């Protein structure tokens, strides 16, 4: 692995998720931060999506604490869990190597886990 880029990120950033590249997807990473998921790649504009919050949640931003990538032929997505136990499905809309949108959908709520296995 060779470092190709360096840039400052939000101080609330807590994790990176590698996005499949080559024939499997657009490549790049998902930057997880307080309240946001941001798709980043070299020579690509950032694409952001807010992490869904509960209607009864206070004003604090939500953090994703664990995740797992699920891959099939011609399909990939991520299951992530917030610090409150909410499971989220994260997927990307893309054509070739151009990502146009990050989609985050609430899936279920389970007790907090140490890891999500795909």
Image (spheres, rainbow, N blue to C red):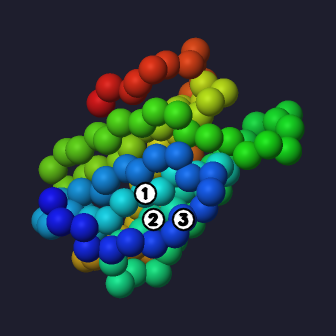
Q: Secondary structure at mark 2?
A: strand
Q: Nearer the viewer, mark 3 or mark 2?
A: 3
**Left or right: where 17 falls relative to 46:** left
User: Do labels 1 and 3 touch, CB within 8 Å?
Assistant: no
Front in this rendered view, residue 72 or 49: 49
- Residue 44 image-quadrant placement: bottom left
User: Do labels 3 and 2 touch, CB within 8 Å?
Assistant: no
**Identity of the residue drawn at 42% across and 36% down:** 67
In the rendered image, which residue does mark 1 sit on? 30
**Does 55 appear above or below 97?**
above
Q: Position of residue 3 (x, y in %)?
A: 25, 67
Whole-number angstrom distance, CA of label 3 to CA of label 2? 12 Å
Can residue 95 be seen here? The reply is no
In the rendered image, which residue does mark 2 sit on? 39
User: Do labels 2 and 1 touch, CB within 8 Å?
Assistant: yes
Classify 10 Å Cα crowding around label 3: few (below 14), some (14-19), many (20 and above): few
In the rendered image, which residue does mark 3 sit on? 9
**Quadrant for the N terminus in the image:** bottom left
Q: Which of the marked residues, 3 or 2, is nearer the chain's N terminus? A: 3
Can residue 67 be seen here? The reply is yes
């Amino acid at each position: 692995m060779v470092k190709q880029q360096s840039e400052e990120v939000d101080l609330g950033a807590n994790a990176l998720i590698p996005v499949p590249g080559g024939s499997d997807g657009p490549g790049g990473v998902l930057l997880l931060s307080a309240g946001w998921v941001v798709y980043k790649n070299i020579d690509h504009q950032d694409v952001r999506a807010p992490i869904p919050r509960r209607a009864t949640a206070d004003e604090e931003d939500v953090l994703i604490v664990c995740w797992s990538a699920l891959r099939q032929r011609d399909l990939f997505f991520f299951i992530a869990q917030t610090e409150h136990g909410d499971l989220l499905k994260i997927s990307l809309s893309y054509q070739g190597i151009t990502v146009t949108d990050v989609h985050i959908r609430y899936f279920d709520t389970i007790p907090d886990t140490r890891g999500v296995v795909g």
